Image (tube, helix red, strand yellow):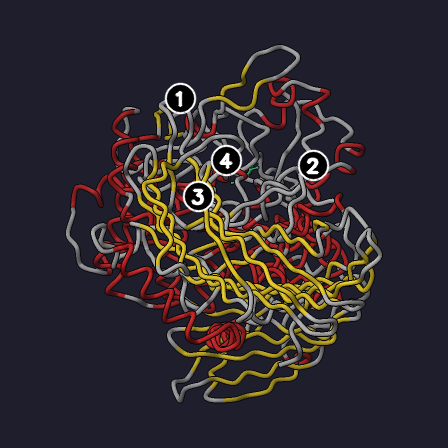
Amino acid sequence: MSTLTRLQDLQFSQHTLNKFATLMAAGNGYLGLRACHEEAYTEQTHGMYLAGFYHRSSAVETTELVNLPDVLQMRIELDGEIFTLLSGTVTDYHRELDLACGELRRSLVWHAPNGKRYQIVCQRFLSAAQHSLLCSRVAITPLDDNARVTISTGIDATQTNSGRQHLDETSVRVFEQRYLQGCYRTLDGSNELVISSFCALPAESCSSFYAKNRRLTQHCSGKVAKGETFELVKTNWITSSLDSDYHSASCSEQALNKLMQCVERGYEQLLAESNQVWETYWQRSRVQLESQNSQDQIALDFALYHLFAMTPAHNEKCSIAAKGLTGEGYKGHVFWDTEVFLLPFHLMTQPEIARQLLSYRWHNLAGALAKARKNGWQGALFPWESAWSGEEETPEFAAINIRTGLRQKVASAVAEHHLVADIAWAVDAYYQVTGDDGFMRERGVALLLETACFWMSRAVEANGRLELHDVIGPDEYTEHVDNNAYTNYLAYHNVERARHYLQQFALPDDDFIRQADRFLARIWLPEAREDHVIAQDDSFFSKPTLDLTSYKEQQGTQAILLDYSRAEVNEMQILKQADVVMLAYMLPSQFTPAQLAANLDYYEPRTIHDSSLSKAIHGVIAARCGRREQAYQFWQQACLIDLGDEPHSCDDGIHAAATGAIWLGAVQGFAGLTVECGELHLNPCLPEQWQSISLPFVWQGVRIQLTLTHQQLSVTSSSEKPINLHLGNTALQITRAATFSLADFFTPLTGSGTTKGTPL
Ligand code: BGC
């Protein structure tokens, strides 16, 4: 494997503090920690989050992922000068996140205002081997003279979610004059949190402790000779009542024991243990490119790093928040992003994680059934935004319009129902890739049935057929429409799959089958016009268009809403994100090649791409049209959503779905690896700039490594079991290893390519 990327920040700047705090955030799926500096900067947004640890501070507020007490900050004083990069001068500044193992390292030489120089090296990691463990190390070497070092650090519970406090301090203690511990409870008493910390210091240093104003602090000081190093290693153990082995009565003692065991092992050993887990992860999932643009590999490594960091693989009652564990955007809620943009990566690399993500929905079925009932429908209506309980968490109103003083109602919870079918789509995808009968019998079929029942009750009789009225498709700039193509087709797919699996697993329900047959025969599936374009909804073609050039230039900012009200935008052909194009991505077999191209060409000029979920999907469809140049442009732009110069993710956190989409673009778009009707298909369309792509995936329990160049495909598998693969239109059977010349299966693409190569 080629060396993994190190994400670098080569110059300290107050302007990019929060950009890098997000990009370089640490995470192990259990905890996430923004990459803030140890020393304080007012601009810096601190954040540490624990998957599933939500709280609602009052009935009028929304449930949010709690920003936990801080253990990272250190007030460092060197010979009486407070260390900050805002005073004195800094040389040899280097900061990097090693994506191979998630260790963040910073080194610099600080020329203090008093003229003395100090070399400072900071390191930290969240353990991938022990989820509760966070270690940091600070090493200070005076370069000019002997020095006096004082460091104050501890557990700081003054952290809030933008000023909102979610935790009561239930106890703060110092044990054996060494171990700090803070115990907290959410204000509603539903969850508990225990944070224990220990600072290892040079033998001759001394410490004092104090607790004041929600801060438990250790004040350490010592002397260090010129050229020698003063080192502080802080080990933290963070647990909560969400852990399966948490017992309120013994949690404090248990946590201390765990902390002590870690302290004994020391930073290097703990890091080595964590590194092993990362190594396995990269072996199972890394996509490797030979590309003319080194940025491409960086983008993929970055995406996969965050896909690991954000995924709560330890607990099937948690799912992935829209910003992972890197910020408070969308309050840490879970959207369709998980099933459609994130789950496919897990499904193809670690299917057991995909199973867990689906199980999260299964555990929350009760909430979905209740929401459907409450609105007069049957089956399961999953909440548009979900947290711990499975109840609808979408805020009723969007941010206040400061010009009018009015708040706009958020319509998604009321009408953005495609999520229901997206979950069913993911269940079907899971079964196709894994053939996991056990999951289907226990959970999958129930999810399919209840979601299907929802659609059957949601459809209305109109125009001599069944229609779906008053919905919002993925394009949220078009609200309350009838027969959104995406929704109708996905609903059809949902009911058809439920019917299929019910029969496959011989679960007799004649009533359901009758209803499903009626629905499938009568639900309106918007048809393509003569020019192959499918209407996004009933009213779409009758709306005027607008030149979107300037808004496209500012995409991601929703600048259009500064010039037009939402109601006005709703009455024009303006898309926030892919909708019919999204449908083509989800259900490729529904589209002919001509329809694929026509819909891409019709809708893209009408799409601002204000959602981070849009660009990469356009890239996949362009690749499926054989337009490698266009596909590459979309994909590269999608890679910049977080990695670009001015990402919108600085305070809010990473765009989780966009990281999944980077993988989708490379694997499903360029490599052209898809699963259709239970079969594995490969229709590559590599960008000219790439010489090769190599990727691992799992198919029916077999681990496969696939390498593609412009000329050749090689496949190796970990098992004797034969693998069936469709290369273009040719069905192949591969055992262990095989190499194919692509010229035997496809006509080569010319230049930018306009049509997909067809089999010879
Ligand atoms: C998008 C939704 C997405 C949500 C969370 C919104 O801006 O329009 O499709 O689910 O962000 O990422």
The amino acid type found where label 2 is placed reads Ile
- Assign the N terminus to one quadrant of the image: bottom right
The residue positioned 56% from the left and 46% from the top of the image is: 582
The vertical placement of 413 against 328, above or below, is above
Mark 2: which secondary structure?
loop
Front of the two marks 1 and 3:
3
Q: What's the distance in space between the residues labelled 2 and 1, CA to CA?
A: 33 Å
- In what quadrant does ligand 1 lie? top right
Disc on res. 161: 4
Asked if disc 3 and disc 4 are in contact, CB closer than 8 Å, the reply is no
Residue beneath disc 1 = 60
Q: Amino acid at mark 1?
A: Val
Pick whichever, 76 or 637, lies toward us.
76
Q: State how far apart marks 3 and 4 are (Cα).
A: 22 Å
Find numbered disc 1 in the image and state the secondary structure of the residue it sits on. loop
655 left or right of 334? right
Other residues around mark 3 within 10 Å, as few (<14) / some (14–19) / many (≥20)? some
Spatial CA span between label 2 and label 3:
52 Å
State which quarter of the image contains the C terminus.
bottom right
Mark 4 → mark 1, Cα distance in angstroms = 15 Å
Mark closest to the chain's N terminus, 4 or 2:
4
Residue 287 image offset from top left, x and y in percent: 60, 71
Q: Which residue is mark 3?
A: 211
Frontmost of labels 3 and 4 is 3
Lower position in the chain sequence, tag 2 or tag 3? 3
Disc with the residue nearer the chain's start (2 vs 1): 1
Camera sees residue 526: no
Q: Nearer the viewer, residue 85 or 605?
A: 85
Q: Is mark 2 within 8 Å of ligand 1?
A: no
